[in-house]
Image (cartoon, grey):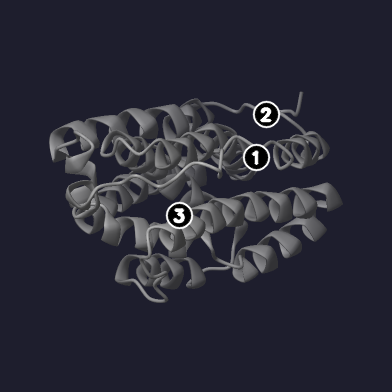
Amino acid sequence: MQTSQQWVNYFEDNLQKKRINWQQSATVTKKELAPILNSLQAWQLGESSDGKNLLKASSSYAERIEDPFYIKAVKLFIKEEQKHGNNLGMYLDMIEQPRIKNDWGDSLFRKVRYLNNSMEWWTLAVISVECTAQIFYQSLKDATQCKLLKEICDDILIDEIPHIQFQQERLSVIFQSKNMFARKMSFHFYKYFFLATSIVVWMAHRKLFKAGGNDFRKYFKKMKFKCAKTIGKLKYLAEEKYVLQPS
């Protein structure tokens, strides 16, 4: 487990890396674009969030645990997500497709997150969405032969792995602060929330997932595996008194 200072160092370094060649043309075909455009636009909107409510929750949390580096790490995490949104937006501009301002899926998740300003709720929601994002962007990459779009997806997929680790480590810290009964109850809630989120995302973007070679069976199998790798890691904390310490 990394400290907040180590995460700040990571994000500052990673934000300097350029992995996309913007000198090449966007070559997506109309046939490829048909099943993916709506989802591409919706995800671009979601990645472009200003993170205001997340910053509010993380600021209160960082002050409570006396860790000023944590809020700085969260700000850099949001900046990296906005980089993804900007890259997707630039691609939409190149193919002369509009950037949308409203999407029912994005609005739903924002409303759900706003119901609770706790760091625990936010972290759980972000983990769930980031895990679906891994399958989303791999599917998007596989649904087209456009090299530029593939590079955009690769850049995001590289970033998503540490993003999930960053959030999973924080959820573990929050989780271990609970008593044993609360841990057991929370563990089951986390798991069912994660899987419910997976289904909602499938419903919103099934055309893109299918275009990328994932029917519901394949998609949900992958999401259950990701649930085991993230939420599932907390199971032992729900069964014994164990304290996770930063390395």
* Mark carried by residue 101: none
Q: Residue at x 40, y 44 (%)?
A: 133
Q: Residue at x 19, y 31 (%)?
A: 218
Q: CA distance from mark 1 to mark 2?
A: 7 Å
What's under tag 2, amino acid-wise?
Leu
What's under tag 3, amino acid-wise?
Tyr
- According to the image, label 1 marks what residue? 173
Q: CA distance from mark 1 to mark 3?
A: 38 Å
Residue 230 screen position, x and y as percent: 46, 33
Which numbered disc, 1 or 3, marks the residue that appears first in the sequence? 3
Question: On the rendered structure, is 154 left or right of 143?
Answer: right
Residue 76 screen position, x and y as percent: 72, 51
Residue 60 falls in image quadrant: bottom right
Q: CA distance from mark 2 to mark 3?
A: 42 Å
> Eyeballing the image, is 230 above or below 107?
above
Residue 90 screen position, x and y as percent: 51, 58
> Eyeballing the image, is 96 above or below 185?
below
Mark 1, other Cα within 10 Å: few <14 / some 14–19 / many ≥20: some
- According to the image, label 3 marks what residue? 91
Mark 3, other Cα within 10 Å: few <14 / some 14–19 / many ≥20: many
Secondary structure beneath label 2: loop
